[in-house]
Structure formats: C-alpha cells, structure tokens
C-alpha cells in the first residue's frame, strides 16, 4: 500500500482536526450572519444509521452559533394526535422563518427507513410517502427554502464498535435504545430500505449527499466544509460597538455577602 492510500485510511490526528474545526466554525459564524442579513431560510436534514455520527456533527456545527438563528429539531415519536395528522404536518411546523437555519436530527425520512424496517407504518403509508416526498420537497424549495440532505454512511464493523462503546460509557449509555438493538440485528433490512428510499428521493432538485462517517473527525470536517460550499455567502461587517461608561456607584451599598447563599466551592 502506497503512502497516500495509507494516509487516507488512518484516523485524522486530533491537532489537525481541532485546527480545521476552529477555522470552519469561524466560517459558520460568517454564514450565520449572512443568513440573517439576507433573510434566507435553510433546512439541513441529517439521516443515517444509529451511531453513524449525525449528532456529533450537528453539535460541532451549532457549537459557536446563535441558537436564535440556528436551531436543532430532534422530534420524539409522534403522539396519538400527531399520528392522525398529515404525515409531514409536525415537520412543517418546525420549518425556518426568514433569517433562520434549522438542522433536523432525523426528519420525515423516519418513515421510509426506521418505520418501514420496524413495522411502525403500513405498506400503504410507506408507498404514499415515497410517492409524495419528492413533491413535498419540491414545494419547500419553490417556497424559497434551501434544502440540504446528508446521509451518514457507517460500516457494520464501525457501528458495532460504537454500540459497544455506548454500553460501556455511562455518559453515552442513554443513547442506546431498544430500537438500536433491533436496527443492529436488521442491518440488511436497513440497507434495502435506504437503497429504495434513495431511488425515489435522491433527485437532481433535492440530492442526497453521502458522508463517509467511519472516521468521525473526517466526517465532521467534510460535512461542515460541504455545507459551507452549498450556500454562497459573504462576510457581513459587524456593527461597531463601544462599551459605554458605567453609571456612578454613588449611593449604592451592596448587601452583606453573608446574607447570600453561595454554591460550595469544591473545585
């Protein structure tokens, strides 16, 4: 194996990763200000198998951004009332207004993959989704929404490694659910569902962008870099701010500190 191929396979070093992430996060702030300035409406969909790295990437995108402009939508399973609604209805209510970017940590694509494999929807509901989804997304795009879709692709060996790490780490154990167990068991069924979903919804107007996510660090950087390339933006010069002089403290006497209850200084 030559050196170039070897370098591609090796995990990305932490130092280089942190430097690139910091640089890209500065660009994300610039993009955020452009979205606000121009009143853009941006929707970014993150899909993929469990433990594929979607959540970690979303966290790095939003880490330095204003939550009033860029927000995450991670909906719980539908309520009894929501099950009787038009399928896309609860997602429509989460769409951005002018000057906002919404990141969907799983989206309406629950139906053709998770719900299909787990038997949470009927065959009629499944096929209706595949028929109507391209039209739904076309409607979003025609309304002025910038729609970007990412599928995080992880190998079976890497997913197994991450599942085991979740079970052993008390800070990650909450991520593991009964659905994860079933998804692990039904690897092939998930693959078939994903392939069929792509055949209907990977269109020229609404393309699926696949992120190779076996290396989490590379996946995060590649996804953020691609996201930045999808929305042409310019640097918006921030308003000049000068701190004013503080008011004169004359006449103010602070109450005794002994009357306040402080957090114990253990550290």
Image: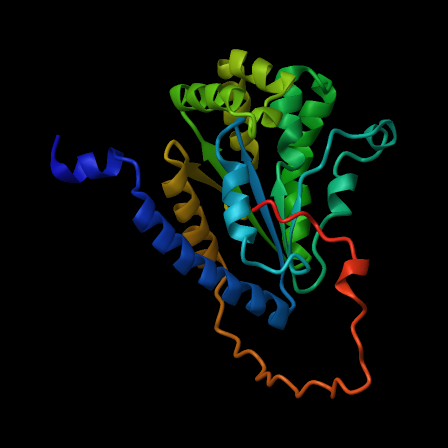
Say which residue appears at 56% left-offset and 36% top-offset.
201
Tell me if residue 89 comes above or below residue 98 in the rendering: above
| Residue 12 visible somewhere in the drawing | yes
Residue 24 location in percent, x, y? 42, 57
Tell me if residue 174 comes above or below residue 7 in the rendering: above
Quadrant for the N terminus in the image: top left
Q: Nearer the viewer, residue 4 or 176?
A: 176
Viewed as shown, does residue 94 lie left or right of 70?
right
Name, please, the residue furthest toward the left.
Answer: 2
Q: Quadrant of residue 22?
A: bottom left
Q: Nearer the viewer, residue 51 or 140?
A: 51
| Residue 203 visible somewhere in the drawing | no
Say which residue appears at 86% left-offset and 29% top-offset.
84
Say which residue appears at 61% left-offset and 72% top-offset.
37
Viewed as shown, does residue 236 lie left or right of 140?
left
Residue 93 location in percent, x, y? 78, 47
Q: How many marks?
A: 0
Tell me if residue 211 comes above or below residue 21 in the rendering: above
Residue 43 location in percent, x, y? 61, 51
Residue 3 location in percent, x, y? 13, 38
Q: Nearer the viewer, residue 248 or 153?
A: 248
Viewed as shown, does residue 223 lie left or right of 4?
right
Name, please, the residue furthest toward the right.
Answer: 81
């Amino acid at each position: 194996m030559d050196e170039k191929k070897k370098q591609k396979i090796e995990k990305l070093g932490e130092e280089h990763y942190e430097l690139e992430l910091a640089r890209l996060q500065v660009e994300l702030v610039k993009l955020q200000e452009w979205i606000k300035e121009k009143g853009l409406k941006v929707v970014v969909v993150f899909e993929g198998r469990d433990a594929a790295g979607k959540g970690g990437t979303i966290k790095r995108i939003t880490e330095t951004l204003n939550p009033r402009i860029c927000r995450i939508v991670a909906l719980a399973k539908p309520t009894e009332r929501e099950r009787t609604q038009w399928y896309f209805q609860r997602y429509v209510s989460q769409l951005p207004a002018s000057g906002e970017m919404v990141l969907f940590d799983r989206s309406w694509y629950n139906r053709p993959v998770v719900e299909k494999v787990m038997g949470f929807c009927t065959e009629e509901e499944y096929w209706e989704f595949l028929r109507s989804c391209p039209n739904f997304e076309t409607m979003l795009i025609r309304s002025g929404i910038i729609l970007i879709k990412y599928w995080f692709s992880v190998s079976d060996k890497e997913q197994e490694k991450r599942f085991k790490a979740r079970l052993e780490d008390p800070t990650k154990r909450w991520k593991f659910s009964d659905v994860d167990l079933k998804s692990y068991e039904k690897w092939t069924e998930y693959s078939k569902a994903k392939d069929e979903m792509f055949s209907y919804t990977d269109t020229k107007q609404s393309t699926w962008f696949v992120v190779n996510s076996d290396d989490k660090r590379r996946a995060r950087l590649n996804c953020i870099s691609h996201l930045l390339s999808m929305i042409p933006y310019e640097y918006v010069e921030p308003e000049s701010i000068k701190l004013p002089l503080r008011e004169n403290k004359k006449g103010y006497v602070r109450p005794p500190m002994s009357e306040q209850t402080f957090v114990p200084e253990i550290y």
